[in-house]
Image (spheres, grey):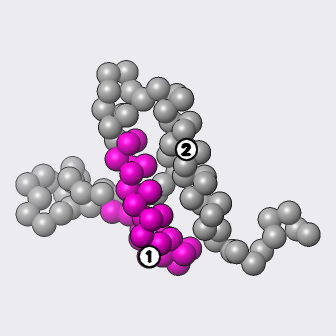
Amino acid sequence: MEITINRNAVPFDPRPPMVTSGLRIGTPALATRGFDEAAFTEVADIIAETLIAGATDGGPAEDTLAALRDRVHALASAHPLYPNLDPMGA
């Protein structure tokens, strides 16, 4: 879905270090881009919906993935890395 996360151990995680139960999201990078509480909630919703869709038999439908990907792109467009840089070079 083009949201970068990695697996991390959580406190008292019974699983071995190479098979962890937690996910870590790089929230400082998102805060630097100006994400507010609503944007972080949208990120969490997208991740949850992606995991739920992936848990279905046969995996997620392509139209579901496309809709989730569009939401990620909308967030990224609303919070550009370099807001003062014109992407068209004008």
Q: Position of residue 30 (x, y in %)?
A: 49, 70
Snapshot quadrant of residue 60 = top left
Mark 2 to mark 1: distance in Å?
Answer: 22 Å
Give the mark nearer the N terminus: 2 vs 1. 1
Left or right: residue 69 compared with residue 24: right
Snapshot quadrant of residue 87 = bottom right
Q: What residue is at 40 percent from the left and 60 percent from the top?
A: 41
> Label for residue 28?
1
Q: What residue is at 60 percent from the left and 68 percent from the top?
A: 79
> Label for residue 86?
none
Reply yes or no: does residue 46 show up in magenta.
yes
Crowd around label 2: few <14 · some 14–19 · many ≥20 (10 Å): some
* Residue 26, above or below 32: above
* Residue 81, above or below 63: below
* Residue 30, above or below 73: below
Crowd around label 1: few <14 · some 14–19 · many ≥20 (10 Å): few
* Residue 29 shows in the view: no
Indicate the secondary structure of the residue bearing disc 2: helix
Q: Position of residue 55 (x, y in %)?
A: 30, 32
Is 10 in front, or is 27?
A: 27
Q: Which residues lie in the magenta part?
A: 24-50
Q: Position of residue 25 (x, y in %)?
A: 38, 63
**Which residue in the structure is indicated by mark 2?**
69
Instruction: Name the magenta segment's main secondary structure.
Output: helix
Query: Residue lying furthest top in this view?
Result: 58
Amino acid found under the numbered disc labelled 2? Arg
Snapshot quadrant of residue 6 = bottom left
Amino acid found under the numbered disc labelled 1? Pro
